[in-house]
Image (spheres, grey):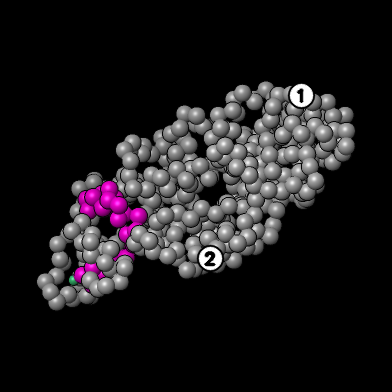
Amino acid sequence: MLFYLDRTVLQYVDEQELKLTDFLEDLCTARRNGRHLIFSEKHTIETLLKLPNLSDRARRTLSAVLRRLRGKLSIYRACMVYVRVVHGNKVLSKELDGHKHQILISLDMINGDELFSKTRILVENRTDGNFYTGLAKLLIAQDRAVQGLMLAYELVAGGGSQTPREYQNLKNSNYLVYCIVDADTDFPGAELGSNTAGPISIMEQNSPHPMKEALILQCYSAENLIHPSMIKSALNLTGTESWFVTLEKLAELDLWNYLALKTRKTCSDFLGGSDKNVYWASKRSSFAPPACPPPCVKDRCSIYTPLKGTTLEKVSNYLNESIEGIPHALPDHNNPNSSEWYKIRDGILSWACAGGRIS
Ligand SMILES: [Zn+2]
């Protein structure tokens, strides 16, 4: 997370010099260890450098921050959320600043080390987390303005339907928390999944917390955010496999985000009067002709061949490995999930941005 030292913190120099010095020591340690970023105006840092009780290490860190201010401007611009440390009495709020959110906090609201620890990224399971962070790193690597930006975070696997409970636990902490879950919706207009996305959405409305945020992805599951080109590379396909050709076609359609990719579809999924089946019936022509002549033999019928359960793990391993070498090249043209990709990128970039270690 980027910590912006507002110019009003200079009022603490006369009022609470020791508290200000302690805070700067903690923040500089976090910066040196590559957990957070510090940003400010030149004059503010120059004034803080004159604090008499500041340690030499903290002074060196702030001097390094001062030298790199100009270079960090593009990261500050890219952050959609950041912490602004301000002078005040028990200030802790989140406010809109242009198109960004700033988390305002005064020194009397900072207690303990949790705020200076790595941001917690809460996900349903570790595979989802590795995929979302791998995707974010890939999109950061492809953006000249933020290329080379480091991320610092700790993944917390909520454990499927236990994720809302874990989110509540983290809401009671002083950690910075960013939660990413899929909506679990299998047709447009469907209600959010009742196990995870639904309860988390209600928590966001009823008990918002400035230092925690949840992103609910508009898709059935994390697999829907995979681009077929990732599967092709991760599984070493030729691209001519018939199931893959079908997948590529489906991935260009609006229905893609709602398709339960790991579940077989049969004729019966396209019949009946439920909202879900009416939607899928309207999409029947996007799928292969009937697999079986009526009457349907449900056990043998397969109108859509599901992805294997291990696909997401293979794709996320592949993405994370590709970033170490040559990042996977994403196609330029728009696809149904690119807007969700950029939400993931912006969220992870903002909540987990960090700098390299400073000795
Ligand atoms: Zn059938």
Magenta segment = 244-270
Q: Would you say 287 lies left or right of 140 here?
A: left
- Is the C-beta of the residue carrying label 1 under 8 Å from the nearest atom of ligand 1? no
Q: Quadrant of residue 323?
A: top left
Residue drawn at (22%, 53%) of the image: 246
Residue 257 is a magenta residue:
yes
| Mark 2 neighbour class, 10 Å CA radius: few under 14, some 14 to 19, many 20 or more | some
User: The C terminus lies in which quarter of the figure?
Assistant: top right
Work out whether residue 103 can be spotted.
Answer: yes
Above or below for 255 versus 98: below
Q: Would you say 22 lies left or right of 222 here?
A: right
The residue carrying mark 1 is 46
Residue 276 is a magenta residue:
no
- Residue 173 disc label: none
Q: Along the line of sight, which residue is nearer the eye, 90 or 239?
A: 90
Q: Pick whichever of labels 1 and 2 is earlier in the sequence.
A: 1
Of helix, strand and loop, which one carries label 1? helix
Q: Along the line of sight, which residue is nearer the eye, 151 or 76?
A: 76
The residue carrying mark 2 is 199
Of helix, strand and loop, which one carries label 2? helix
Residue drawn at (35%, 59%) of the image: 188
* Three-letter amino acid code at the position of disc 1: Glu
Q: Would you say 167 lies left or right of 126 here?
A: right
Q: Quadrant of residue 46?
A: top right
Q: Quadrant of residue 107?
A: top right
Q: Nearer the viewer, mark 1 or mark 2?
A: 2
Q: Would you say 230 lies left or right of 238 here?
A: right
Q: Position of residue 133 (x, y in %)?
A: 49, 47
Work out whether residue 265 can be spotted.
Answer: no
* Three-letter amino acid code at the position of disc 2: Pro
Residue drawn at (70%, 53%) of the image: 174
Q: Position of residue 260 (x, y in %)?
A: 34, 62
